[in-house]
Amino acid sequence: MTELTIFYDGGCPLCAMEMRHLSRYDSEQKIALQDIHAKGFAQRFPHIDPVRADQILHAQLASGEMIYGLDVTYTAWMLVGKRHWVAALRWPVVKQVSHCMYLFFAKHRTRISRLLTGSDRCEVCEIKREEP
């Protein structure tokens, strides 16, 4: 059963890289990954504004509740059994600082992607799940 649906920018090399990495650990398929730029996205998810979802990571819990930014990151890694990797994101001071850093990253991710990967957009990034 899907516990979390993540709405991510599939054209961002860093975003796609993190989703591929996350999906490798999601052996129980608790997470559904949805590219906000995929054909038919607006029809399938009319409650998600792709422009806003392009500015800050969005996800929906199985309960229907929406979560954003680093709360998505924390929840996703917790669901795949890697909570210890992101536990510091919940510490009071770290949470505030990391939130500010995330907002900076989200705003400038194309430039950061270009610096780290040599490309600011990825036209062929696709997340494929390995069959169990």
Image (cartoon, rainbow, N blue to C red):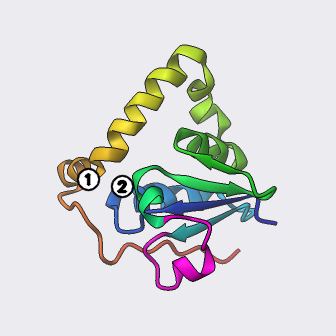
* Count of marks overlaid on the render: 2
Looking at the picture, does residue 103 appear above or below residue 30? above
Chain part drawn in magenta: 36-49
Along the viewing direction, whichever of 41 and 132 lies nearer the viewer: 41
Q: In the image, is residue 45 part of the stretch drawn in magenta?
A: yes
Quarter of the picture holding the N terminus: bottom right
Along the viewing direction, whichever of 96 and 49 lies nearer the viewer: 49
Looking at the picture, does residue 92 appear above or below residue 43? above
Magenta stretch, main secondary structure, is loop
Whichever of labels 2 and 1 marks the residue nearer the N terminus, that label is 2
Which residue is rendered at x = 56% and y = 70% of the image? 34
> Mark 2 is on which residue type?
Leu
Q: Which residue is mark 1?
A: 113
Q: Which residue is mark 2?
A: 14
Looking at the picture, does residue 119 appear above or below residue 76? below
Based on the displayed image, in which of its 4 quarters is residue 122 positioned? bottom left
Determine contact: label 2, label 1, CB under 8 Å. Answer: yes
Q: Residues within 10 Å of mark 1 (few under 14, many from 20)?
A: some
Which residue is rendered at x = 18% and y = 48% of the image? 115
Residue 45, percent across and down?
Answer: 61, 73
Residue 129, percent across and down?
Answer: 59, 73
> Mark 1 is on which residue type?
Ser
Residue 19, percent across and down?
Answer: 50, 59
Based on the displayed image, in which of its 4 quarters is residue 12 positioned? bottom left
